[in-house]
Image (spheres, rainbow, N blue to C red):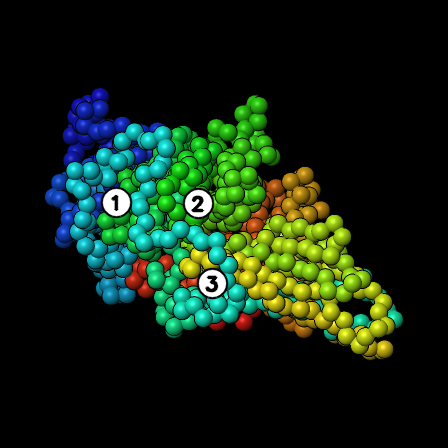
Amino acid sequence: MGSKWRKAKLALGLNTCLYVPQTAEESSSPSPNGIVESRHSDAVSSSSLLSPTGIGSDRRPTTPTPSSSGLLLPKSGLKSSKRTCAICLNTMKPGHGHAIFTAECSHSFHFHCITSNVKHGNQICPVCRAKWKEVPFQNPASDLSQGIPRINPVNWPRDDAWMTVLRQIPPPRVDVSRPITSLLHTPEPVIFDDDESLDNQPDISKNTTSVEEQSSNNNCIGIVEVKTYPEVPAVERSSSHDNFSVLIHLKAPLTSARQNGSRNPVSQNSRAPVDLITVLDVSGSMAGTKLALLKRAMGFVVQNLGPSDRLSVIAFSSTARRLFPLRRMTDTGRQQALQAVNSLVSNGGTNIAEALRKGTKVLVDRKSKNPVCSIILLSDGQDTYTVTSPCGIHPRTDYQSLLPISIRRNNAAGLHIPVHTFGFGADHDAASMHSISEISGGTFSFIEAESVIQDAFAQCIGGLLSVVVQELHVRIECVHPSLQLGSIKAGSYRTSMMADARMGSIDAGDLYAEEERDFLVTMNIPVDKSSNEMSLVKVRCLYRDPITKEMVNLNEAGEVTIERPEVAGQLVVSMEVDRQRNRLRAAEAMAEARVAAENADLAGAVSLLESCRQALAETTSARAGDRLCVALAAELKEMQERMGNRRAYEETGRAYVLSGLSSHSWQRATARGDSTDSTSLLQSYQTPSMVDMVTRSQTMLLGNPSPRRTLSSVKSFPAKSQPR
């Protein structure tokens, strides 16, 4: 069959872009999970990684295998392709003010159209899928004023800062007898206990230190800051006050690098190392630009992990495969990780359940453990193997089957492995991705625009690489003998309360550097004429320092007192308490609106959001122009627009709402790549380390920031006077 196609190609002319399928003898078949040994990356060629000069071999590039068809010719013929840009479908004529780029395969495009494609690492002709030796590169230093683009060889992109980083990596010191390609095709072991050992990593200690001992430790990165705010400062002696609110505000310490004024807040010596599993969808729908951008984003992740961090990659389509075991990201580890990622091609279905089981198994079976561990899951489709109804059409509403029991929160094994999920595009199953993250204690991000996938990953790892507090446990104890707790509002964090309502607790999990948490506790204030002052509750904190491995006990973190005068007069409600009430009220409205929308009542959903907006506008903090209230109103308005009709809700509304709910329930930044400009007002829950990593992602793409769709966090909860 292959020889016939070659004859047809010769008959039409050597310059005609015709894909000739390879015979079985000439190429290896792709494995079910989309791995092909001979296929190079759309983002980075493996030859550029192995060659000391970055030039690679002088072999003629082979035509990559399309995922859907073998013969790819323009429908209107070859001549029309010269007159029409295949990207924007507008005419291409000299003198119309647009530079024209003609590729070596003879297809022509508007220069500005193809540079937008190429800057994300796509070196394949959009028409015929031929791999180019030379690509157009738009740069301020290019002679674009005369319409002359700068052309760079594919294997030597000297203007690409990300590739410059790759070229600076020294030649790998590896056992050449076992290249990465051999790992890809080696049968997987039954037990994944082949993780690379950790050097000088002490076992986790059960010791507990006091605040004084911790402060004297030179390795200490600081202690958690605890502040409390009563709803009002005083209650009259002869009066009671039901549902009196007390705000508990926590803020994690800085990393030691920031304390020392370093510009690199996630340097290896100032933070806890990470075991990271990335579970990547390489099904057929990821073909083309999606897969190229995913490879580029993974390259960014690899480059920003340190030598004590370990990475393993799971690729899945119809089946799932571990590309390589947990490996330290030394120079050698990075090289091999990049080669493994570059080997991916897209084909097959979507088996999220098997991929999660395999990713979990890597962490459960490992011999040694870094203090921080997490799973990152990205998919652009629905699980076609597990989450289906009996008729195989509509997904079930119960997604428990997608997540292994061993990593669900509060499981008997005691493991805490958060899964941070990323729904890519309009066709992913937002409900299942959100459910997976919620059950495991992770976050759900909605990547609407393809161009921000790397920024979304950057924000996530910016947090994971700055964990300074683990296993944070907050305890609230009533001080006054007649006082009882009413409720503890902590979102998705687990809370508990004693039967006599005299004590309650919150399991707040891990905190990133300078990350903040706000919890509202309500109680009923009784009549008390015995004193001018009343002690309400005490707050205590216990957590693990991930660097020293010691438990830190803040026995006297905070005590809340109020005055009990004869006459209280006019009292002003605490602004801090009021804005947190607004945040919780907005989150509740979003959850109710989502339920209404799922029940096909979009009008009711929009009405709920509008009623909440109007109620927020009447609050004390809103009338004072509080920035949080402005951001909440903007988020509610955006959700109303995305619930305007069923199509809008199905395509983006559901995912947008769920990513917002995930962010509010965990008080943690989740990405939503949309066309809204990202401003300081809308950077919700982002920590300085996250901001720094996103900035690094944006500036590393082309050597300087380029105008493109910006990563927007959930637009609801701006930072409270955090340094930026």
* Quarter residue 226 falls in: bottom right
- For the N terminus, the image quarter is top left
Give the residue number, with chain letter if any, for mark 1.
336
Q: Amino acid at mark 1?
A: Gln
Front-most of residues 13 and 447:
447
Give the residue number, with chain letter if any, for mark 3.
513
Residue visible at 39% across and 44% down in the picture: 277
Q: CA distance from mark 1 to mark 2?
A: 20 Å
As helix, strand or loop, the secondary structure at mark 2 comes to strand
Asked whether, in this view, residue 421 is left or right of residue 646, the answer is left
Q: Position of residue 514 (x, y in %)?
A: 49, 65
- In primary-sequence order, the first of circles 1 and 2 is 1
Give the residue number, with chain letter if any, for mark 2.
375
Q: Amino acid at mark 2?
A: Ile
* Quarter residue 58 falls in: top left
Asked whether, in this view, residue 587 is left or right of residue 426, the answer is right
- The answer to whether residue 269 is above or below residue 11 is below
Q: Position of residue 46 (x, y in %)?
A: 22, 44
Q: CA distance from mark 3 to mark 1?
A: 30 Å
Density class for disc 1 (Cα within 10 Å; few <14, some 14-19, many ≥20) is many
Q: CA distance from mark 3 to mark 2?
A: 20 Å
Say how many tags the image has: 3
Can residue 547 be seen here? The reply is yes
As helix, strand or loop, the secondary structure at mark 1 comes to helix
Asked whether, in this view, residue 417 is left or right of residue 662, the answer is left
Front-most of residues 58 and 15:
58
